[in-house]
Image (cartoon, rainbow, N blue to C red):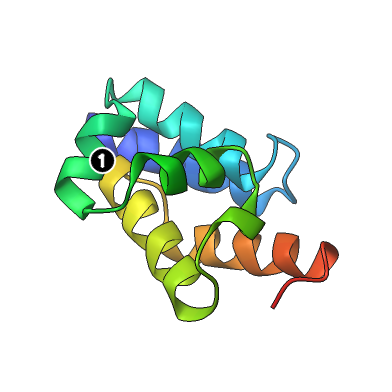
Amino acid sequence: MNSKTSDQTFDGGARGGGADGSLGQQLRRAREARGITLREISEQTRITMRHLEAIESDDYKHLPGGIFNKSFVKAYARHVGFDEQVALELYARTAREHGES
């Protein structure tokens, strides 16, 4: 029941137009709320620490690009209980705003 509450909290904030911060900030908060380290995510998802740090910093130019970026964001979101679709929508919006594909 707690995980549902957490999911709803983070999901609700994300759907609120990003008022709760950027995608990276929201994912970091979701991770910290669950007591998960970046190292744990890296070990479980096989995404490098450098790439996870780039996601949390909204620094997508340091990711490999294309479908890999979406896969990384989706895997990170899934691992911390953040709504994957919301994460992908926020990622796409941020990428568009920064002129990235």
If the image is split into quadrants, where does the C terminus sit?
bottom right
Residue ID at (53%, 66%): 88
Amino acid type of the residue that numbered disc 1 sits on in the rendered structure: Ile
Position of 29 relative to 47 (above/below): above
**Quadrant location of residue 84?**
bottom left
Relative to 96, 1 lies left or right: left
Question: Which residue, given by chain and number where applicable, does mark 1 sit on?
Answer: 41
Relative to 6, 27 lies left or right: right
- Front-most of residues 62 and 10: 62
Image coordinates for residue 29, horizontal then vertical, percent: 49, 27
Residue ID at (58%, 41%): 24
- Front-most of residues 81 and 8: 81
Image coordinates for residue 13, horizontal then vertical, percent: 61, 41
Q: Residues within 10 Å of mark 1 (few under 14, many from 20)?
A: some
**Quadrant location of residue 54?**
top right
Image coordinates for residue 97, horizontal then vertical, percent: 83, 64
Residue ID at (32%, 58%): 75
Image coordinates for residue 4, horizontal then vertical, percent: 29, 41
Residue ID at (20%, 33%): 40
The secondary structure type at the circle numbered 1 is helix
Q: How many marks?
A: 1
Relative to 12, 95 lies left or right: right
If the image is split into quadrants, where does the N terminus sit?
top left
